[in-house]
Amino acid sequence: TTSVDTQIFYTSFHMIAPTIKTFMSVLRKQAHLHQQYAATLDAAEAALADLRKRLPSSHWESLQEMNPDLLELVRHAINYLLDTCSREQRCFEAFFEPRLPQEALDSLLSDLCGRCSEVLLPALQRERSWELLANAAELLKAELQDFRGALQVRLALRHCLATAQRQLLILARQELSTTGLDGNASVSSSSLDAALKVLAACYRVLE
């Protein structure tokens, strides 16, 4: 979807949210007085979260069908995940006042992160280019360093980074085994250069 389509999609929800939020605020204020108020508020939040979970799924399916290279896939998936989680949290909070704990919102964000992981993790695990993996891992690492958003998103990005790092180390060992750095033969300058590039990439990703 384009940014204009996305904006239109969320605008309709934000237009009706203030009226509903008025009633939800009354429920929250009365929740400590009667269990039924609290249960009703929880059910309303869960209902909205369940509805929202069904809406963005087509994008991940179309992304897989596009079959981009790993770096493009990681970049696109990160951008879409961050944008969607931010929009969905703002949409949810347009209907309900923030409170702790807020299990419905946590569940919604976890679901979105899970869909992202379902796309990224298999792609990272099947990648056979250590250079692409190193670049993808650096992209994930940089995003994590700057990220200040929801815990669910941070955990998802960290999981993807750990997967990229493990796969990179596997490919690095395979690459180094072909360079002759086993102590049993002389090593050419080209092999040494290749080995140093692999080691430098691993260092940058793991430091």
Image (spheres, grey):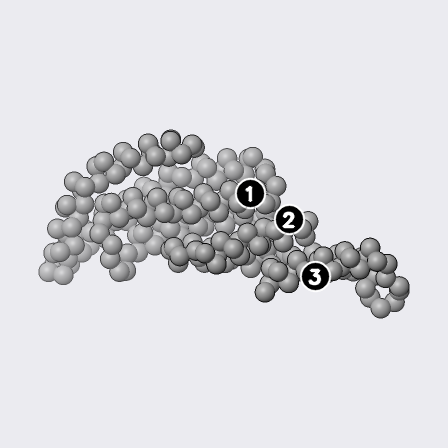
Q: How many marks?
A: 3
Q: Position of residue 7 (x, y in %)?
A: 34, 34
Choose between 36 and 78: the one closer to the eye: 78
Q: Position of residue 31 (x, y in %)?
A: 15, 57
The residue tagged with tag 1: helix, strand or loop?
Answer: helix
Tell me which residue sits at (24%, 45%) in the image. 94
Is residue 174 visible in the rendered image? The answer is no
Residue that label 1 marks: 73
| Residues tagged 1 and 2 counted as in contact (Cβ below 8 A) | no
Tell me which residue sits at (76%, 56%) in the image. 194
Mark 1 or 3: the one toward you: 3
The type of residue carrying mark 1 is Leu
- What label sits on residue 132 in the rendered view? 2
The residue tagged with tag 3: helix, strand or loop?
Answer: helix
> In which image quadrant can residue 65 be found?
top right
Q: Give how far apart the Cα atoms at labels 3 and 2 are.
A: 14 Å
* Mark 1 or mark 3, earlier in chain: 1
* Mark 1 or mark 2, earlier in chain: 1
Give the vertical position of 154 relative to 49 (above or below): below
The type of residue carrying mark 3 is Leu
* Mark 3 or mark 2, earlier in chain: 2
Quadrant in the picture for the C terminus = bottom right
Tell me which residue sits at (31%, 52%) in the image. 105
